[in-house]
Image: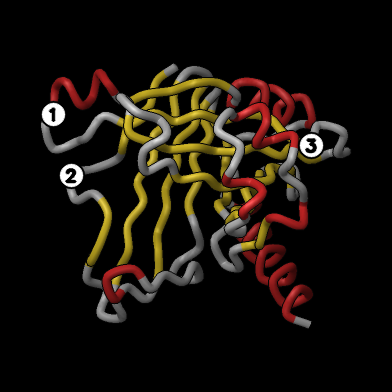
Amino acid sequence: MKFKKTILIISLFAAFYHCKAQNKISKYDLKELCKNLSGNYSNVLQAKNDKMFSKKSLIITPIWQNKKNEFWFLEEVANFENINKNNNKIVFRIFKMNDSVIVKQIYTIKKSTILSQYKTTDNYIQNLTSKNIILRPGCAIFFNKKNEIYYGRTHDTDCPSSINGAQFESRNETISPNAIFILNQGFDNNGKQVWGNTKGEFKFFK
């Protein structure tokens, strides 16, 4: 029942975006977007010019590539100097909801003794299965396309968060062929920001 409700919410939100679409999105656009997503990114240039931003690496690796009309990825964000320190991994799924909306669904990865022993990304991915991941309800990011840029965000207060007393999480992403900009923040029930960057988005470049 919860699964059906989640799908209904996504469908209604996608329908709203459809009315406001800037550009139509084809299957070719989806494939090109996912092809461009893969790679190693960093915000070193941003951190060099603004000390408010720490140096981070962002690695996006395709996984489970035999899926039809959807694309799966492992996303890793870590300290730039040491990617094994504070390495935060998630799995996400990209698919086309309709002619104007692409959805990025977020999954957390279960803690696993088996997975924790694999230090390289290749070995980790080889042993990562759908049984290792959990969908984060309400945390999908909805993208519209304008020219060659994709602009996405979570829906209102739908994505729950309990970090530092937060009630919900807001995530905005901008994806271009060689860069990804990310703003991830948590807010309490009064709408006050309680975690996340206060000076703007992290700007990752390939």
Number of the front mark, 3 or 2: 3
Give the foreground label among 1 and 3: 3
**Residue 17 figure quarter:** bottom right
Q: For label 2, count other residues whose C-alpha is less than 10 Å away and answer few (under 14), some (14-19) or many (20+).
A: few
Colour convention of the picture: secondary structure
Q: The C terminus lies in which quarter of the figure?
A: top left
> Quick one: SS at disc 2?
loop
Foreground pick, 26 / 197: 197
Please identify the quarter of the rendering in which residue 33 is found: top right
Q: Residues within 10 Å of mark 3 (few under 14, many from 20)?
A: some
- Mark 2 / mark 1, whichever is N-terminal: 1
The disc placed on residue 64 is: 3
Q: Is residue 150 left or right of residue 67?
A: left
Amino acid tagged 3: Trp
Query: Hey, what amino acid is under mark 2?
Result: Lys
Q: CA distance from mark 1 to mark 3?
A: 37 Å
* Secondary structure state at the residue bearing disc 3: loop
- Residue tagged by mark 2? 199
Residue at 23% in and 65% down: 193
**What residue would you read off at disc 1?**
50
